[in-house]
Amino acid sequence: MMAPLLSVRGLNKRYGSIVACRDIAFELEEGEALAIVGESGSGKTTLLNLVAGALAADSGEVVYRMRDGAARPLSSLSEAERRALMRTDWGFVHQDASRGLRMNVSAGGNIGERLMAIGGRHYGRIRAAALDWLARVEIAAERVDDPPSTYSGGMRQRLQIARNLVTGPRLVFMDEPTGGLDVSVQARLLDLLRGLIADMGLAAIIVTHDLAVARLLSHRMLVMKQGEVIESGLTDRVLDDPQAPYTQLLVSSVLAA
Amino acid sequence: MNALAANELLRVESLAKTFTLHLHGGARLPVVHGVSFSVAAGECVVLGGPSGVGKSSILKMAFGNYAVGEGRILLADGDRVIDVGRAGAAGILDARRRIVGYVSQFLRVIPRVGAIDVVAAAAQESGLDRAAARERAASLLARLDLPERLWSVPPATFSGGEQQRVNIARGFAGRHRLLILDEPTASLDAANRGAVIDLIAERKALGTGFLATFHDEDVRARVADRIVDVSLFSDREVA
């Protein structure tokens, strides 16, 4: 049987006396979308950063099945291999789009940069790919030469998604991808993400405090509290028949519109 | 593990469910216990009993939407058997794609997706290609008499009955061998109820099994092969 795309085992992280993540373990299959939910301070963003290699764990390991089929602990990758992975097979969508974009480079340049980083040299093809991706994330072609500093929040987020997906990654990390956006803008972005995840067969790890986002985007959920996973399972089961006291509190605290 | 009989699609064995309400001092709310029945290919089993007796909870457990309390729910998968309570998230999602479909009482709308795309997506998920899925979606929506001008419109603004017809079309779009229907006809007029009855009869003839609840006596009489009275298993006092 093939190894899972990603295996996380025994991850721990403390900040001084504060436990940010305690003994976290989970697996992710290809094409599977996993939501990590919990209130702020629950450790969910720390966990995302640990798994993505943006933060060093105190102990534990993350094993990733590379494109050649070999399951490799991330700690065994050379710096060059890790960078190559981040640029091709992984994407990272930040809540704050300015962290994931070059704000003063044109939109086309932002998308093309990822392609050039993996060896794309043909200007015409890179430009065509950039225009194709702008269309897929519903940004008008005439904005291709404008930098994202001139874009609205929702457009920036869509551009960040295009930049991440242009290399055809297999795994995308998302940290509150709809956070800070107007509700109408959120709905559009969610629908776009839902379609892209399904069409591209993407695996995704989505950190969100918004249970509606988790329901719409994820197959499976982890619920975190004080650095620990206190409940996990099929997303609609966790939301409709929550077992843990804290999950019941989270679910019952959502206002139904 | 007991294998299922050759034509058995679903077997529920000594099923029990209790909700623990942690926000209310850990109060335990028993729903049902000792539920046992099975559904064979081409058969429509209707859960009966007054509202609040636990019918929907049984349907939701069979679909993996509620956790199985005690007992087992077994689902036929060719010559293999899926134990719903132990299948895990990936196992349940796989079963929902290939084996078991669900029509709830209300459509959970997805923003910005048109009615025909909602239905076609379900057909595509069960293995039809894009063009065939769209064709199937169109034929179902037509049979359920949803006006064609609404097909490309997201169902959020539809009436309850229109949304429910989209919901039913979506449930019937796939090629599931077992369909779970939770009050699918509650908000439909007589003509559309008739269309649903016809759809059920056609699928039964093809070997699809049904586990359902129907508020409507007439619908129940016309589609049910067997009625399982849930009040025999209920822990609730029903008014």
Image (tube, rainbow, N blue to C red):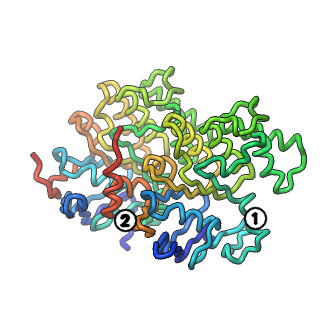
Q: Which mark is residue B215?
A: none
Q: Label 2: few (<14), some or many (≥20) within 10 Å?
A: many
Residue under label 2 = B85
Vertically, is A131 above or below A42?
Answer: above
Q: Is residue B10 visible?
A: yes
Whether residue A146 sits left or right of residue B203 in the image: it is right
Q: Where is residue B177 in the image (x, y as percent from the top left)?
A: 44, 51
Count of numbered circles on the image = 2
Front in this rendered view, residue A192 or B39 = A192
Residue under label 1 = A83
Which amino acid, mark 1? Arg
- Which of the chains bears the disc numbered 1? A
Q: What element carries label 2?
A: helix
Q: What residue sits 66% from the left and 51% below the top?
A: A99
Which amino acid, mark 2? Gly
Q: Label 1: few (<14), some or many (≥20) within 10 Å?
A: few
Vertically, is A227 above or below B238?
Answer: below
Q: Quick one: which residue is furthest to the front in this view?
A: A16
Q: What element carries label 1?
A: helix
Front in this rendered view, residue B91 or A231 = A231
Q: Is residue B119 visible?
A: no
Front in this rendered view, residue B121 or A195 = A195
Q: Where is residue A74 in the image (x, y as percent from the top left)?
A: 67, 73
Front in this rendered view, residue B33 or A133 = A133
